[in-house]
Amino acid sequence: MSRVHEFYKNEGSKIECLLCRHYCKLKDGQVGICGVNKNENGNLVNLVYGKVSAINIDPIEKKPLYHFLPGNTSLSIGTVGCNFQCPFCQNWQISQSKSLDGSYDVTPEQLVSLAVEKGCKSISYTYNEPTIFYPFAKDVAFLAKEAGLKNVFVSNGFESPEVIDDMVGIIDAFNIDIKGFKDEYYKKYLKGGLEGVLDTLKRLKERNFWVECTTLIVPGDNDSDEELRDIANFIAKELDVNTPWHISAFHPDYKVNDKGATPVETLQRAYNIGKEAGLNFIYMGNILNDNTTYCPNCGESLIQRVGFSVRKNILNNGKCPKCGTEIAGVWR
Ligand code: SF4
C-alpha cells in the first residue's frame, strides 16, 4: 500500500504513466494531464492515494447500474482530478481541481469497514475519473473482495489496456460513458479520444466484466439521429444487445450555460433509435420516467423503479418467472 505505484515504464530520462491512454511521459517533478500522477525522483507517485474528496452511500441505481445487485447500496468515493476536461462536467468542482485542501485522509481498511458496517454490497469508484487513482482503488478493491463486496468503476472509458488486464478478478462492473461518436469532438472538446473508449469497451466485454453504457445527450453536440444511431449500433453490434444503455438528460453546468436542458422528446427519439438498433434495455436518466426492466422475450415487467429506488423485483435466479428467459446482469 503506497503512493508510489508500478503502472509506469522508463522512457529514457522520463517515466511513462501507464494508467490511461494519454500515456504521459513525465520528467522529474512533472505532473501528468490528470494533475494527480507525478514523477518524483524517478518514482511515479499517485498524489490522491488515500485522499477522498467525496464519499456517500448511494443506491447502485444512481451510478447508474440497473442490472447489477438492484436495490442495494454502494459506498461511493472519488478524489480530485480527471484525465478529460468536459466543459459540461457535473462534478467539475472535484474533477477539474488539483487541490487536496478539501480531501479527507482514509485508508482502504477504513473504507471497507464502513461499507460493511453500512450494509453496502459494493464499493463504487466514481464522481471523478477513477482510472487516475487506480493504485488506491485497487488496494481498496482487494480488501473489499476479501470482505465479500463487489467493486464498480464509473468511468469515461480511457483506461489503458494494461490497467484493464490488471482489473480482472478485482473490478466487477463498469458504467462507461459514450459521450458521442466523433473522434474530433472527443479530442478537441473533451480532451480525450473516441477510439480508445470504444477499444476499452470491447476489451471489457471480451474479459466478461459487467458493462452498462451511458450517453449524456447534449443538445446540438451529440443529439443527431445519425450520431445516436452510431452509438446504439456500436453497442448492439460490438458489445451486445443486452448491454443496458442509459440515455441521460443534460442540464446546464460548469462552462456550458448557453444551452437548455435536453427535451424529453430528444430522449424519446434516442430511445426509439436504440430500439431500432435492437437494444433490449434502454433507460432514461435525469428525468422522471418509467424505467422498468421488461423481459425481452415475453414483455413481463420484472424490475420496477421509481427514481433510484426499486419498487418491485420478481426476477427468479436472474430469470423471468413467466417464461424462464435469462436476463443479462449480476443479480447476487
Ligand atoms: S493517469 Fe493518464 S493523464 Fe494521468 S499521468 Fe497517467 S497517463 Fe497521464
Image: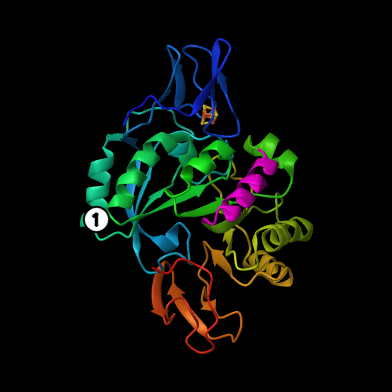
Chief secondary structure of the magenta span?
helix
Residue 94, given in percent of the width and then of the height, sits at 43, 37
Question: Which residue is painted at 52% across and 65% down in the image?
Answer: 287
In the picture, the quarter occupied by the C terminus is: bottom left
Question: Can residue 70 be seen?
Answer: yes
Is 25 magenta? The answer is: no
In the picture, the quarter occupied by the N terminus is: top left
Q: Residue furthest right?
A: 226
Q: Nearer the viewer, residue 208 or 34?
A: 208
Q: Is residue 87 left or right of residue 97?
A: right
Query: In the rendered structure, which segment of residues is drawn in magenta?
Result: 193-209
Q: Residues within 10 Å of mark 1 (few under 14, many from 20)?
A: some
The residue where tag 1 is placed is 116
Question: Which residue is painted at 33% across and 43% down in the image?
Answer: 140
Disc 1 CB within 8 Å of nearest ligand 1 atom: no
For mark 1, give the secondary structure. Answer: helix
Residue 19, given in percent of the width and then of the height, sits at 52, 33
Q: Is residue 306 above or below residue 147?
A: below
Q: Quadrant of residue 46?
A: top left
Question: Which residue is painted at 42% across and 81% down in the image?
Answer: 316
The amino acid type, in three-letter code, at marker 1 is Val
Q: Is residue 60 left or right of residue 129?
A: left
How many marks can you see? 1
Is 205 magenta? The answer is: yes
Residue 22, given in percent of the width and then of the height, sits at 60, 30
Q: Nearer the viewer, residue 256 or 240?
A: 240
Residue 228, given in percent of the width and then of the height, sits at 72, 59
Question: Which residue is painted at 64% across and 65% down in the image?
Answer: 267
